[in-house]
Image (spheres, coloured by chain):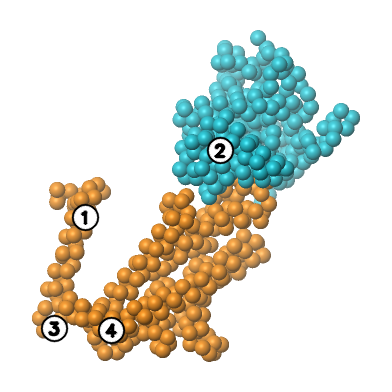
Chain colours: A orange, B cyan
Amino acid sequence: MIKRWFRPFEKVSSKESAIIILIWIVLVLGYWTLASTGTKHLFPTPGQVWNGFKSLYEEGLVVHIVSSLGLFLQAIVLAVIVSLTIIYLSPLPALKPVAVILSRFRFLPLTGITFYLAMLVSDARRMQVSVLVIFMSLYFITSLLSVLKDIPQEEIDHARSLKSSRWEVLWEVVIKGRFDYVLDVLRQNLAIIWMMLVTVESILVAAGGLGVLIKNSDKFMNHGRIVALQLVILLVGLMLDVVLNVLRKSLFKYSTF
Amino acid sequence: MALKYELKQTILHVDNLSVAYDGKVIIHKVSFEEKDTVRPEKNTGQTIAFLGRSGRGKSTLFRTLTGLEKPTTGKVLIPDYKKQITNGLQPAKMVEEGDVGFVNQKYTLFRHKTIYQALMFALRKTNLAKSEKHDKIMSYISDWGLEGCMNQYPVFLSGGQRQRTAILEQLLSSGYYIVLDEPFSGLDIGNIRNVKKSFQLISDSNELNTIIFSTHDIELAVELADSIYVVGYDKSDSSGSQVGTIVKHFDLKEMGLAWHEGLKKEHIDLIDNIKQVMLAS
């Protein structure tokens, strides 16, 4: 059986897949335990990480997660509104360059934009939201432009042949017909957005959030806390990914990709 | 034996049509006329086939016939049934988007609409009341064997169900005309039979119904069509440019070969003749 696991493109049963995953978990945990023993070690021990969790919880981990999710939601809603407005108007030849140029702006460095925003926005929370909205929008616009580009000409022609005006084609094929893709684009860009959110949170310590906890943990070189926090951030990110995927599939039954 | 028929008003008039993209001419000098065919005691629509080798401009011609493509020169005229007959003639109009239904070989549908919703959308510009639209849709759904899947999205439909829905929504939306670009391409024997049945249903339901389709299957074209056009390169063009045009027309009604069950020797001869024309163009 084990020999088959090392043959390229071999199909394995779900039971075998579960065994393989279990073996990996045991290997990782075993390596972690071994690598964290002795006087000099890179990783904290599982016990230190557990203590890190407890310390984070006592420091209000749940409140910080809620704060991060609040900021995330606020920024996402604004970024989606901004980027969808730009994208839905991009089939108009006169406005297409706006979307294309904004998409290119994603190569701008975060620090440069933050510098100018700091001069324009005095409130730190608004500053956090502004930075996130600007960067999220640039990534969304890039991904949504690609969704738009991939709409086959046949779908446009099909709508036109059913007496649809050009605005109706935009509404039926692009807006209604691809709304599930918006949720998928959101999900695909989630990792980079989530990473950005934690970085941006460190701008304003008073507002709290997971980014603030990372900053504090880094300061005190508390390895157990740092790893525990990384795990929390990873799990919350994965949870958001799952939620968006479930939301897409339940809201749009035809969205089978 | 030739079956009796009579030719009435012009139902499609294409005059000196040409289409060019960025200066490159794809088709030119395309002219033809089709008339309403009336058979005694039988409702028969028109079934027109376009044959031709790949790259000769059939798809471009079809897009122009449906109004999806603006011709560079020439015009496509159809009767304007919204206007009153004057001096015994139905006034004509230039074809516009939506006047002629168009089904591509992928049988494209709205991915976010169920069959019922798609058919309701196809009827949205008619003056029928909501209940009348519902009744009409249900009647078609029943006739075309789509009852079991009327609330399904295209992604869950079989190939045959997709084909029938795609044809039906164009029929409901456009009225008498339907253009199908290679409707038999890549279909298995069962689905070919389904599409053939759909053609029969359309043709039998109104004498003005006109099906225009392209195919690479000459035998199928001879079996189904009452008029066949071969699209090929214009060898008379002295510039030697490869531009598509109609190189030959076979009127199967006139030849006594239309509306026959099965293929006779004359049909086989015609198939050979068409092959020769296609190879030479």
Query: Mark 2 belongs to which amino acid?
Result: Thr
Left or right position of A86 against A236: right
| Cα–Cα gap, marks 2 and 4 | 61 Å
Query: Mark 4 belongs to which amino acid?
Result: Glu
Q: How many marks?
A: 4
Residue under label 4: A58
Q: Which of marks 2 and 3 is in front?
A: 2
Q: Nearer the viewer, mark 4 or mark 3?
A: 4
Question: Crowding near pointer 3: few (<14 within 10 Å), some, many (20+)?
Answer: few
| Cα–Cα gap, marks 3 and 1 | 35 Å
Query: Mark 1 belongs to which amino acid?
Result: Ala
Residue under label 2: B165
Quarter of the figure with residue B126: top right
Classify mark 4: helix, strand or loop: helix
Disc ID at residue A40 = 3
Residue under label 1: A18
Subunit of label 2: B
